[in-house]
Amino acid sequence: MDVNGLTLRELQAGDEAAFLAGVASWRGEELEWHSFHWKPGMAFAELLEILRKQRLGLDLAPGRVPASMLYGFVDSSIVGRVSIRHDLNDFLRKIGGHMGYAVAPAYRRRGYATTMARLGLDACRAVGLRRILVTADDSNASSWRIIEKLGGILENIIELEGALKRRYWIDL
């Protein structure tokens, strides 16, 4: 999927340098925003296998659901990622939703989040989803404005661990 010079796709074997540069671009922030599974010292091939199994729903860790991790590339640089959960468990029904996205600090405020989220909707359709839950912290106006721009309808705002979380549904 390619829009305005941004390609959203799964990682491939030749993406190791871009992925590691992406890790470095998140320095000072939670690495989980770049990857839920990669740990320092992990072989890139191991990460690719974990992502493949997660997409297929094989050998899932407790609390995990089948999911696709897609990375936003501009030229050869990773600017962010979109995670698509193919199904929801109780936790994801409350807070995580079907789709989450993050943009590396150096690439923010350039429209990449909106483009990646829009392409993420196509990825949701591709795995058979017809209605998705997307959440955002109430304090993250940039994120919930993107969700609203993409057709998100606010269901409610819940409090979780002292923070307010907005829950939106998008019909695909």
Image (cartoon, grey):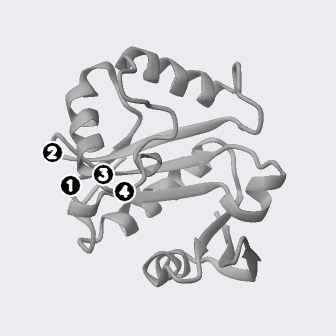
- Depth-wise, is mark 4 or mark 1 nearer the camera? 4
- Disc nearer the start of the sequence (3/2): 3
| Amino acid carrying mark 2 in the image | Asp
Give the alpha-carbon distance from disc 3 to disc 2, as whole Å.
Answer: 19 Å
Whether tag 3 and tag 4 are in contact, CB under 8 A, the answer is yes
Looking at the image, residue 90 sits to the left or right of residue 22; the answer is: right
Spatial separation of the CA atoms under disc 3 and disc 1 = 22 Å
Residue hosting label 1: 5
Instruction: Specify the quadrant of the image occupied by residue 113.
Output: bottom left
The label on residue 55 is: none
The outermost residue toward the left is 75
Q: Identify the residue at horizontal 15%, vertical 45% (top origin).
A: 75
Mark nearer the viewer, 2 or 1:
2
Q: Amino acid at mark 3?
A: Trp
Judging by the rendered image, the residue that carries numbered circle 4 is: 29
Q: Is residue 161 above or below residue 10?
A: below
C-alpha distance separating marks 2 and 4: 24 Å
Residue named by callout 2: 75
Q: Residues within 10 Å of mark 1 (few under 14, many from 20)?
A: few
Q: Secondary structure at mark 3?
A: loop
